[in-house]
Image: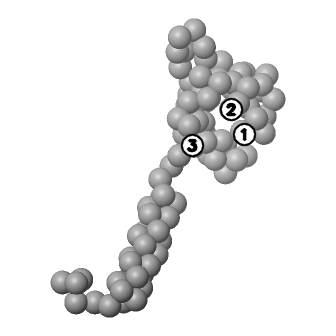
């Protein structure tokens, strides 16, 4: 079917398709959460603008979800974000 198109028309069609695909991929990627699920205490503290000590206290009190993995305490970033959002709305 494309054999009936001129070379210019094929090039224009290819450019149009490439542009549409690029836009579609960009829209999909904008919806994908690419942030890490788990972070170390120092990285999580930096992310949330807290000191390591303040974050560790919240983890120790069970206010921020975390898990011990391979001997390291890691913060559940999604859970921590929800907790921080809830705390800022309340206080």
Which quadrant holds residue 40? top right
| Place of residue 46 in the rendered image (x, y in percent of width and height, measured from the top left) | 76, 35
Which residue in the protein does label 3 denote?
A: 35
Residue at the (67%, 51%) spot, across then down? 89
| For the residues bearing labels 2 and 1, Cβ distance under 8 angstroms | yes
Mark 2 vs mark 1, CA separation in Å? 6 Å
Q: Is residue 84 visible?
A: yes
| Place of residue 12 in the rendered image (x, y in percent of width and height, measured from the top left) | 42, 85
In the image, residue 74 sits, relative to residue 48, either above or below, namely above
Mark 2 vs mark 3, CA separation in Å? 12 Å
Front position in the image: 23 or 69: 23
| Place of residue 52 in the rendered image (x, y in percent of width and height, measured from the top left) | 77, 25
Residue at the (36%, 86%) spot, across then down? 7
Which residue in the protein does label 1 denote?
A: 48
Front position in the image: 33 or 54: 33
Precedes in sequence: disc 2 or disc 3: 3
In the image, residue 14 sits, relative to residue 43, either above or below, namely below
Side of 52 where 31 appears, left or right = left
Residue at the (41%, 70%) spot, across then down? 21
| For the residues bearing labels 1 and 3, Cβ distance under 8 angstroms | no
Front position in the image: 13 or 71: 13
Residue located farthest toward the top when viewing the structure as drawn:
71
Q: Which numbered tag is attached to residue 14?
A: none
Sort mark 2 into few (<14), some (14-19) or many (20+) by Cα contacts within 10 Å: many
Mark 1 vs mark 3, CA separation in Å? 13 Å
Residue at the (40%, 89%) spot, across then down? 8
Which residue in the protein does label 2 denote?
A: 44
Precedes in sequence: disc 1 or disc 3: 3
| For the residues bearing labels 2 and 3, Cβ distance under 8 angstroms | no
Sort mark 3 into few (<14), some (14-19) or many (20+) by Cα contacts within 10 Å: few
């Amino acid at each position: 079917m494309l054999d009936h198109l001129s070379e210019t028309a094929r090039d224009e069609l290819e450019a149009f398709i490439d542009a549409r695909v690029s836009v579609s991929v960009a829209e999909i990627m904008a919806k994908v959460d690419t942030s890490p699920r788990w972070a170390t205490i120092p990285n999580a503290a930096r992310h949330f603008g807290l000191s390591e000590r303040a974050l560790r206290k919240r983890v120790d009190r069970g206010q921020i979800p975390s898990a011990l993995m391979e001997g390291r305490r890691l913060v559940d970033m999604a859970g921590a974000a929800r907790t921080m959002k809830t705390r800022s709305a309340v206080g």
